[in-house]
Image (cartoon, grey):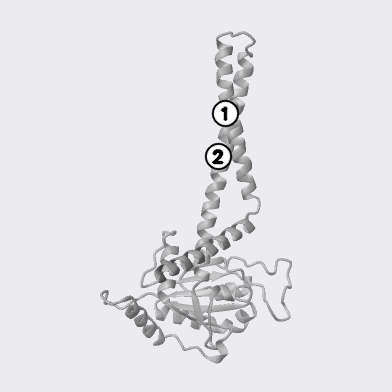
Amino acid sequence: MVTSARMTAKEELQRLEDERVNMRAEAEAPFRTLRLVIFGFSVASAGVGTLISLPQLAGALNGGRNAMQVDDVLTNLAINIGAVTIFAFLFRQDWKAREKQLVRLGRESALASQRVLLANGKRRTLRDLQGTSRCVLLAGTPSQVAASLAAAEPYREQLLQRGVFIVPVPIFDEPASSSGSGGDEQQGQQQQAAATIPPLERGDLRWRGEAQQLQGYKQWFQDQLSFSSSKVTSDTGLYVGLRLDGRVRASGMGGAPWARMVAELAPLEGESKWAGMLDGFDGDSAPR
């Protein structure tokens, strides 16, 4: 009974997550469902018209009584076949776009559920930080993450004004032993990270946090990389920048482009807040 209850709770959480993803998909493309209905109905209507035209064509060719002219039947048949082809193509393209959108939103939702430790000792999910923080995840070896974190220090005040919140994620260069348990593996990663990444201080509350349950982050990054031909090696790191609404706005290999983020992101506080016409729109900060 306990196992059944747990499964039921898990299924309920998954259902709520699926509903959240579908609502976000509908918000991003509010007319897609309507387009799919129109395209699908048009395909069905033109298909019926094609089926009706076939016996009409047979009657016209045989010179049947009250039969339509062959040219008229051929014209109708061509129009219906063309309509089926065009609307079927449009339906297929929109459906494929919808599937890609749901996959992307599903990945973003999975990332939003990852947990982070704040400087005040509280644990929050990345979803809890949406609306107030532009999270930037730094993944790689502990030394790579520490180097990227140190590179952000000269821009600290400017990044804070823009709501940038850094989450170091040291998930690579795992212990050489492959026979250890998952818990020992995660503990080894955290111990290795502690040797190079500075511990959280009270003043880091709005600046950075500490990734919790690294295995979940690692699985997400591995899934993310499976959609790309790029491969992370011991010589490369990875960064992922999120928008205020939690969507992935930029990602790339190596360290995060802090100077570019300062130049492109609109401040959330200070005298220059909302100074430009397009302020508030998170732009691409990927290196070019």
Q: Residues within 10 Å of mark 2 (few under 14, many from 20)?
A: some
Depth order, front residue of 96/203: 96
**Quarter holding residue 203:** bottom right
Up-down relation of residue 270 to residue 286 (above or below): below
Residue 106 visible in the shown view: yes
Up-down relation of residue 280 to residue 73 (above or below): below
The residue positioned 52% from the left and 54% from the top of the image is 100
Callout 2, which amino acid?
Phe
The N terminus sits in image quarter:
bottom left
* Residue that label 2 marks: 89
**Quarter holding residue 134:** bottom right
The residue positioned 39% from the left and 68% from the top of the image is 232
Callout 1, which amino acid?
Ile
Depth order, front residue of 160/89: 89
Image disc number at residue 100: none
**Quarter holding residue 187:** bottom left
The residue positioned 43% from the left and 66% from the top of the image is 7
In the image: residue 45, left or right of residue 179: right
> Disc 2 on helix, strand or loop?
helix
Question: Residue 59, percent across and down?
Answer: 57, 13
Question: Residue 194, percent across and down?
Answer: 41, 86
**Which comes sooner in the sequence, label 1 or label 2?**
1
Up-down relation of residue 255 to residue 46 (above or below): below
Q: Residues within 10 Å of mark 1 (few under 14, many from 20)?
A: some
Question: Residue 39, percent across and down?
Answer: 61, 40
> Disc 1 on helix, strand or loop?
helix
Q: CA distance from mark 1 to mark 2?
A: 12 Å
Residue at the bottom extreme of this rendering: 202
Depth order, front residue of 211/55: 55
Image disc number at residue 81: 1
